[in-house]
Image (tube, grey):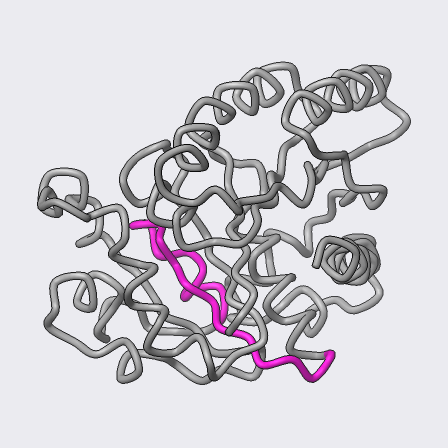
Protein backbone atom coordinates (compact mmCIF):
# COMPACT_ATOMS: atom_id res chain seq x y z
CA UNK A 1 0.00 0.00 0.00
CA UNK A 2 0.99 3.61 -0.51
CA UNK A 3 2.71 5.62 2.21
CA UNK A 4 0.33 8.49 2.99
CA UNK A 5 1.60 11.94 4.02
CA UNK A 6 -0.59 14.91 5.00
CA UNK A 7 0.63 18.51 4.98
CA UNK A 8 -1.09 20.30 7.85
CA UNK A 9 -1.32 23.58 9.74
CA UNK A 10 -4.57 25.33 10.62
CA UNK A 11 -2.94 28.68 9.92
CA UNK A 12 -3.13 29.81 6.30
CA UNK A 13 -0.28 31.21 4.26
CA UNK A 14 2.39 28.89 5.62
CA UNK A 15 3.13 27.06 2.37
CA UNK A 16 1.06 23.88 2.69
CA UNK A 17 -0.03 23.83 -0.95
CA UNK A 18 3.36 24.94 -2.28
CA UNK A 19 5.03 22.22 -0.23
CA UNK A 20 2.44 19.64 -1.32
CA UNK A 21 3.08 20.49 -4.98
CA UNK A 22 6.84 20.31 -4.47
CA UNK A 23 6.61 16.97 -2.67
CA UNK A 24 4.32 15.47 -5.32
CA UNK A 25 6.42 16.67 -8.25
CA UNK A 26 9.71 15.93 -6.50
CA UNK A 27 8.75 12.34 -5.72
CA UNK A 28 7.40 11.89 -9.25
CA UNK A 29 10.72 13.12 -10.64
CA UNK A 30 12.37 10.32 -8.64
CA UNK A 31 10.24 7.80 -10.57
CA UNK A 32 7.84 7.23 -7.68
CA UNK A 33 4.14 6.72 -8.35
CA UNK A 34 2.45 9.59 -6.54
CA UNK A 35 -1.16 10.64 -5.96
CA UNK A 36 -2.00 14.10 -4.66
CA UNK A 37 -5.29 14.62 -2.81
CA UNK A 38 -6.67 18.14 -2.42
CA UNK A 39 -8.79 18.42 0.74
CA UNK A 40 -8.82 22.22 0.74
CA UNK A 41 -12.07 23.71 -0.63
CA UNK A 42 -9.99 26.52 -2.16
CA UNK A 43 -8.78 23.95 -4.70
CA UNK A 44 -5.30 25.42 -4.95
CA UNK A 45 -3.44 22.12 -5.29
CA UNK A 46 -5.23 21.10 -8.48
CA UNK A 47 -5.11 24.63 -9.88
CA UNK A 48 -1.39 24.91 -9.18
CA UNK A 49 -0.75 21.76 -11.19
CA UNK A 50 -2.79 22.89 -14.18
CA UNK A 51 -6.23 21.34 -13.56
CA UNK A 52 -9.48 23.19 -14.39
CA UNK A 53 -11.02 22.59 -10.98
CA UNK A 54 -14.41 24.16 -11.75
CA UNK A 55 -15.06 21.90 -14.74
CA UNK A 56 -14.42 18.43 -13.35
CA UNK A 57 -15.53 15.95 -10.72
CA UNK A 58 -13.68 16.35 -7.42
CA UNK A 59 -13.04 14.64 -4.10
CA UNK A 60 -16.40 16.05 -3.00
CA UNK A 61 -18.18 13.87 -5.56
CA UNK A 62 -16.26 10.83 -4.33
CA UNK A 63 -17.22 11.57 -0.71
CA UNK A 64 -20.86 11.87 -1.81
CA UNK A 65 -20.67 8.51 -3.57
CA UNK A 66 -21.41 10.18 -6.90
CA UNK A 67 -18.04 9.33 -8.48
CA UNK A 68 -15.48 6.56 -8.22
CA UNK A 69 -12.15 7.85 -6.98
CA UNK A 70 -10.35 6.08 -9.82
CA UNK A 71 -12.44 8.03 -12.34
CA UNK A 72 -11.62 11.50 -11.00
CA UNK A 73 -7.84 11.14 -10.88
CA UNK A 74 -6.14 13.61 -13.23
CA UNK A 75 -2.85 12.73 -14.87
CA UNK A 76 -0.38 15.63 -14.82
CA UNK A 77 3.33 15.84 -15.72
CA UNK A 78 4.02 16.12 -11.98
CA UNK A 79 1.97 13.23 -10.66
CA UNK A 80 -1.66 12.14 -10.40
CA UNK A 81 -4.07 14.51 -8.63
CA UNK A 82 -7.58 14.35 -7.19
CA UNK A 83 -8.81 17.96 -7.23
CA UNK A 84 -11.15 19.90 -4.96
CA UNK A 85 -13.26 23.02 -5.21
CA UNK A 86 -15.55 25.24 -3.14
CA UNK A 87 -18.31 22.60 -2.92
CA UNK A 88 -16.21 20.83 -0.30
CA UNK A 89 -16.59 23.79 2.08
CA UNK A 90 -19.88 22.37 3.43
CA UNK A 91 -18.29 19.09 4.51
CA UNK A 92 -18.52 19.80 8.24
CA UNK A 93 -22.31 20.02 8.09
CA UNK A 94 -23.00 17.74 5.14
CA UNK A 95 -20.96 14.69 6.13
CA UNK A 96 -22.43 14.10 9.56
CA UNK A 97 -23.08 10.37 9.53
CA UNK A 98 -21.32 7.89 11.84
CA UNK A 99 -17.89 6.91 10.60
CA UNK A 100 -17.37 10.13 8.69
CA UNK A 101 -13.79 10.28 9.99
CA UNK A 102 -12.96 7.33 7.71
CA UNK A 103 -14.34 8.70 4.43
CA UNK A 104 -10.94 9.36 2.92
CA UNK A 105 -9.27 6.26 4.32
CA UNK A 106 -11.99 4.08 2.82
CA UNK A 107 -11.63 5.80 -0.57
CA UNK A 108 -7.87 5.34 -0.60
CA UNK A 109 -8.27 1.59 -0.14
CA UNK A 110 -9.50 1.49 -3.75
CA UNK A 111 -6.35 3.11 -5.19
CA UNK A 112 -3.58 2.80 -2.61
CA UNK A 113 -2.05 -0.28 -4.20
CA UNK A 114 -1.32 1.67 -7.39
CA UNK A 115 0.94 4.24 -5.74
CA UNK A 116 4.13 4.51 -3.74
CA UNK A 117 3.04 7.73 -2.03
CA UNK A 118 -0.15 9.70 -1.44
CA UNK A 119 0.26 13.38 -0.51
CA UNK A 120 -2.71 15.19 1.05
CA UNK A 121 -3.07 18.97 1.08
CA UNK A 122 -5.31 19.93 4.01
CA UNK A 123 -7.39 23.08 4.63
CA UNK A 124 -6.25 25.82 7.03
CA UNK A 125 -8.58 24.56 9.76
CA UNK A 126 -8.93 21.74 12.27
CA UNK A 127 -12.21 20.38 10.91
CA UNK A 128 -13.60 17.05 9.68
CA UNK A 129 -11.53 17.30 6.48
CA UNK A 130 -8.33 17.65 8.47
CA UNK A 131 -9.36 14.78 10.74
CA UNK A 132 -10.00 12.64 7.65
CA UNK A 133 -6.48 13.41 6.45
CA UNK A 134 -4.99 12.46 9.83
CA UNK A 135 -6.99 9.23 10.02
CA UNK A 136 -5.90 8.21 6.50
CA UNK A 137 -2.24 9.13 6.90
CA UNK A 138 0.89 7.35 7.98
CA UNK A 139 2.62 10.64 8.75
CA UNK A 140 2.24 14.42 8.92
CA UNK A 141 4.48 17.27 7.82
CA UNK A 142 3.81 20.65 9.44
CA UNK A 143 4.93 23.66 7.37
CA UNK A 144 5.24 26.94 9.24
CA UNK A 145 6.65 30.41 8.65
CA UNK A 146 9.15 31.79 11.18
CA UNK A 147 6.66 34.03 12.96
CA UNK A 148 5.39 33.88 16.52
CA UNK A 149 1.71 33.49 15.56
CA UNK A 150 2.54 30.61 13.26
CA UNK A 151 4.39 28.93 16.11
CA UNK A 152 1.41 29.32 18.42
CA UNK A 153 -0.79 27.72 15.77
CA UNK A 154 1.33 24.60 15.72
CA UNK A 155 0.91 24.07 19.45
CA UNK A 156 -2.87 23.95 18.91
CA UNK A 157 -2.51 21.04 16.48
CA UNK A 158 -1.23 18.73 19.21
CA UNK A 159 -4.65 18.16 20.77
CA UNK A 160 -6.20 17.10 17.47
CA UNK A 161 -3.27 14.80 16.65
CA UNK A 162 -3.45 13.21 20.09
CA UNK A 163 -7.20 12.61 19.75
CA UNK A 164 -6.81 11.01 16.32
CA UNK A 165 -4.02 8.77 17.59
CA UNK A 166 -6.10 7.75 20.60
CA UNK A 167 -9.36 6.97 18.81
CA UNK A 168 -8.67 6.37 15.10
CA UNK A 169 -5.04 6.05 14.01
CA UNK A 170 -2.53 5.03 16.69
CA UNK A 171 0.24 4.64 14.12
CA UNK A 172 0.20 8.29 13.03
CA UNK A 173 3.66 9.89 13.06
CA UNK A 174 4.94 13.43 12.53
CA UNK A 175 7.86 13.51 10.11
CA UNK A 176 8.78 17.04 11.11
CA UNK A 177 8.16 20.77 11.14
CA UNK A 178 9.24 22.53 7.94
CA UNK A 179 10.21 26.20 8.11
CA UNK A 180 9.08 28.08 4.98
CA UNK A 181 9.56 31.67 3.78
CA UNK A 182 12.79 31.52 5.73
CA UNK A 183 15.38 34.28 5.96
CA UNK A 184 18.17 33.19 8.25
CA UNK A 185 19.55 36.71 8.44
CA UNK A 186 16.58 37.90 10.48
CA UNK A 187 16.83 37.65 14.25
CA UNK A 188 13.14 36.72 14.51
CA UNK A 189 13.64 33.75 12.19
CA UNK A 190 16.47 32.49 14.37
CA UNK A 191 14.44 32.95 17.54
CA UNK A 192 11.39 31.17 16.11
CA UNK A 193 13.63 28.36 14.88
CA UNK A 194 14.84 27.80 18.43
CA UNK A 195 11.28 27.90 19.77
CA UNK A 196 10.07 25.52 17.04
CA UNK A 197 12.66 22.99 18.20
CA UNK A 198 10.96 23.06 21.60
CA UNK A 199 7.50 22.61 20.06
CA UNK A 200 8.82 19.78 17.89
CA UNK A 201 10.12 18.01 20.98
CA UNK A 202 6.67 18.25 22.57
CA UNK A 203 5.18 16.70 19.43
CA UNK A 204 7.77 13.93 19.44
CA UNK A 205 9.34 15.08 16.19
CA UNK A 206 12.05 17.41 14.84
CA UNK A 207 12.48 20.49 12.70
CA UNK A 208 13.63 19.63 9.18
CA UNK A 209 17.26 20.51 8.53
CA UNK A 210 16.12 21.98 5.21
CA UNK A 211 14.63 25.48 5.31
CA UNK A 212 12.62 26.87 2.37
CA UNK A 213 13.71 30.34 1.30
CA UNK A 214 11.35 32.87 -0.26
CA UNK A 215 11.26 33.86 -3.93
CA UNK A 216 8.79 35.51 -6.29
CA UNK A 217 8.90 32.29 -8.34
CA UNK A 218 6.90 30.55 -5.60
CA UNK A 219 3.98 32.91 -6.27
CA UNK A 220 4.36 32.83 -10.05
CA UNK A 221 4.59 29.07 -10.66
CA UNK A 222 0.92 28.23 -9.82
CA UNK A 223 -0.34 30.80 -12.33
CA UNK A 224 1.47 28.82 -15.03
CA UNK A 225 0.24 25.44 -13.76
CA UNK A 226 3.83 24.31 -13.27
CA UNK A 227 5.84 22.92 -10.40
CA UNK A 228 8.58 25.12 -8.93
CA UNK A 229 11.13 22.69 -10.37
CA UNK A 230 9.81 23.19 -13.88
CA UNK A 231 9.08 26.92 -13.64
CA UNK A 232 12.27 28.09 -11.96
CA UNK A 233 14.69 25.19 -11.44
CA UNK A 234 17.60 27.40 -10.33
CA UNK A 235 15.61 29.46 -7.81
CA UNK A 236 16.29 29.18 -4.09
CA UNK A 237 12.95 27.47 -3.36
CA UNK A 238 13.58 24.85 -6.08
CA UNK A 239 17.00 24.10 -4.63
CA UNK A 240 15.58 23.96 -1.10
CA UNK A 241 12.59 21.80 -2.01
CA UNK A 242 14.91 19.34 -3.77
CA UNK A 243 16.79 18.94 -0.49
CA UNK A 244 13.50 18.71 1.40
CA UNK A 245 12.25 15.83 -0.77
CA UNK A 246 15.52 13.98 -0.21
CA UNK A 247 15.37 14.60 3.53
CA UNK A 248 11.75 13.42 3.67
CA UNK A 249 12.62 10.15 1.96
CA UNK A 250 15.53 9.65 4.33
CA UNK A 251 13.29 10.17 7.39
CA UNK A 252 10.66 7.79 6.00
CA UNK A 253 13.25 5.08 5.38
CA UNK A 254 14.46 5.40 8.98
CA UNK A 255 10.92 5.32 10.40
CA UNK A 256 9.81 2.20 8.55
Q: Is 156 above or below relative to 114?
A: above
Q: Quadrant of residue 96?
A: top left
- Is 179 part of what is drawn in magenta? no
Magenta range: 30-49
Residue at point 64% right, 62% down?
A: 23
Quarter holding residue 43: bottom left
Task: Kindly identify the residue that appears in the image at 30 percent across and 82 percent down.
Answer: 70
Residue 168 pos. (x, y %):
36, 42
Q: Nearer the viewer, residue 177 or 202?
A: 202
Please provide percent x and percent y for residue 64.
12, 63
- Picture mark count: 0
Left or right: where 236 falls relative to 156: right
Q: Quadrant of the C terminus?
A: bottom right
Q: At x 74% / y 79%, what residue is drawn?
A: 30
Q: Give the left or right position of residue 233, taking residue 59 as reference.
A: right
- For this rendering, which residue is in front, 38 or 46? 38
Which percent across, then down, holds residue 157? 49, 26
**Residue nearest the observer in this picture, 143 or 165:** 165
Query: Which residue is drawn at the image coordinates 12% and 45% (left, top)?
Result: 98
Query: Is residue 31 found inside the magenta-colored segment of the image?
Result: yes
Q: Residue furthest right?
A: 185
Instruction: Give residue 103's position: percent from left, percent from top.
Output: 25, 56
Q: Is residue 110 above or below residue 65?
A: below
Amino acid sequence: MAYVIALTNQKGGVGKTTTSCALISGLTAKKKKVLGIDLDPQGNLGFSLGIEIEECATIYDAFKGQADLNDIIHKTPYGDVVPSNILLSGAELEFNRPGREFLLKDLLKTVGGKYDYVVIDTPPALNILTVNAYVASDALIIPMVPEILSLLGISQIKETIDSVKKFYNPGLNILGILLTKYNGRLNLAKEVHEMSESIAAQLGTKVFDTKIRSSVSIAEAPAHGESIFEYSPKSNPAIDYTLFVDETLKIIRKSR
